[in-house]
Amino acid sequence: MPENTPIDSEVLTHVIEREVGGWQGKLRRNPLFHLLLAFFVGIIAGLGAVAFRRLIGLMHNLFFFGQWSFSFDALKHSDASIWGAGIILAPIIGGLIVVWLVRNFAPEAKGHGVPEVMDAIYYKRGVIRPAVVLIKALASAITIGSGGSVGREGPIIQMGAAFGSSLSQWLRLHEWQRLGLIAAGAGAGIAATFNTPVGGILFAVELMLVEVSARTLVPVMIATGTATFVSRLFLGNHPSFVIPASIIASTAHETAADYAAYVIFGLLVGGVGLLFTNTLYWTEDLLEKWFKNAYLRTILGMASVGLAMYLIQRFTGHYYVEGVGYATVQNVLESTLLNPGFLLLLLVLKVFSFSVTLGSGGSGGVFSPSLFVGAVLGGAFAALVTHWIPGYQMGMAVGAALGMAGMVGASTGAAVTGAVMIFEMTNDYHIIIPLIVVSGLAFGVRRLFTRESIYTRKLIRRGHFIPEARHSNLYLMRPAAQLIETPMVRLRGDRTLADLQKILLHRRELPHVLIIEGTMPLAVIPAHRVAEILRREIRHVPLSDLASTDWVAVRDDSQLYDLVARLRACACETALLCKKDPPEHHEDVVAVVTVEDILSYASLPQVLLRPERGPQ
């Protein structure tokens, strides 16, 4: 078999789950050994983060200056390239190399990385191919080093997770151990690159762990702490950004006006975060639709990125939007970029170059671009409110810090991680409350429009649903009758839509409609269906013509998992909770429950409520 042929994940998982004896079987049952593995994963993740940053420096120096050097300071703007306008070709050349690597060796290395880890956890039983580690590192370093506008955190997360998975496969660990080490590797990677150990733990908890318990959380803690320590040994104990303490400390004396500004800003960041996510996937769809050939798509897309990068350097003196963009973020934090119009221009250019880089086949993360967008948006907001409101002042560093936390929460869905990571970077407790307010509101605005984050939307497009909540079996063990939140009305089938409208005039909430015939239940019109038919001009159509007879009867004392099983087995979306099964009278029907009710109540993944497929 050629080396680049993907391994069948089903075959591989059956092999690694097989009960074995010998030293591997004994060790995997030893809790102390599992913790030692987490320690080892942390060491490798820390070293990997350091090596990856060095590799980015090497690629940047090769593409921009033709030099073999690992020296690179992400917080300082790069000097102008020796190639002049020829630097426009650098992203094109880098993009072509990346597309070739990804297509021939590791398709999982394409894009921003974290969705692939989540997909492996939920749909491949934690199996990530070892080749992903090397190809992802090389592809992302080339993309970033050649000027692609993406982040380095997503690749580090994916590499840490891949190592945890590969180690688990080699040792034939249990699935829960494998998934735990994947989360540990991911959290360790982001903790090492940002020097934020607590943020790394929370990232793993919010996005990676399918089970939050001592046996999974302690390994994550060990790995993130170890990776951070290793990173500090090589890179120093410095925050990712240098934030002026004197400016941030102003949050210790907040007024009502400050909190009003934080609320408004949180809502604004949420809207921009939604735009940030949508623009990425709109761009990907357009480029794939217009340019079917992957190499042609890369040439044209990365040419536009290179042109934008060159033009902004030509007229302003710095590349600003190339690579991870941390130098620009540092400028905002130091209040050296004061023009809000220019900051908003940088925001637009960053969103454009980021979306085109990934949409045309690049490899890199979304974390750094979200920090960039949040920082320039926060700086612009602080400058504008200070100018527009007499006597009111907001430091640009404060606005930038709040914007970074809010954008992470809105785009990735890791709202707690975003707030805590920025708090760790500032090392100032006073800013924690504004961080919580802005990050929480930004997340809420995005969640108001869509439940999918920038990570999960990529998987949804494949038909892979990721649960939004991680909880115990509490909801599944409760009686199905506790789902009753939507009211129900009983009507004869010969009643019309006009009759239903009159009844609903006196109700605050749309009910499920149970259609009865004689003494028996006949059909159902779910509440969401009621809303649809009320918009039609069919006032005198009998309700029985609009109702569905596709329902299943379930006893009202059944537990929720029994109800889900019945709906799946019968391929139904509606259940009647009854005192008797089957019901002998329509009075036996206690309530109507739909799939939408279950999703809302228990926050279960939609895939769980798909009907079971019979034999093909």
Image: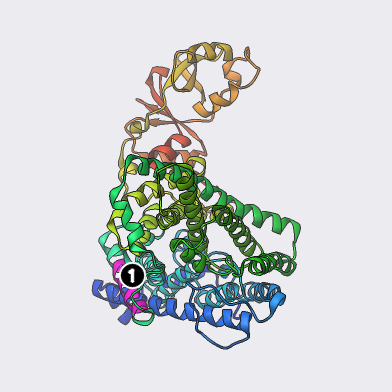
Magenta residues: mostly which secondary structure? Answer: helix
Which image quadrant for residue 545?
top right
Q: Position of residue 34 (x, y in %)?
A: 29, 73
**Is residue 224 in the magenta section?**
yes
* Way the structure is coloured: rainbow
**Observer able to see residue 38:** yes
Dot 1, crowdedness within 10 Å: few (<14), some or many (≥20)?
A: many
Q: Is residue 173 above or below residue 479?
A: below
Q: Position of residue 306 (x, y in %)?
A: 67, 69
- Relative side of 268 to 483, left or right: right
**Observer able to see residue 201:** no
Q: Residue 515 versus residue 73: which sits nearer the camera? A: 73
> Would you name the residue on which mark 1 appears?
224
* Residue at 34% from the left image edge and 25% from the top image edge: 579
Q: Position of residue 111 (x, y in %)?
A: 57, 65
**Is residue 598 in the magenta section?**
no
* Residue at 66% from the left image edge and 77% from the top image edge: 97
What is the span of residues highlighted in magenta in the rendered image?
219-232
- Relative side of 538 to 18, left or right: right
Q: Position of residue 144 (x, y in %)?
A: 57, 72
Q: Residue 238 versus residue 439: which sits nearer the camera? A: 238
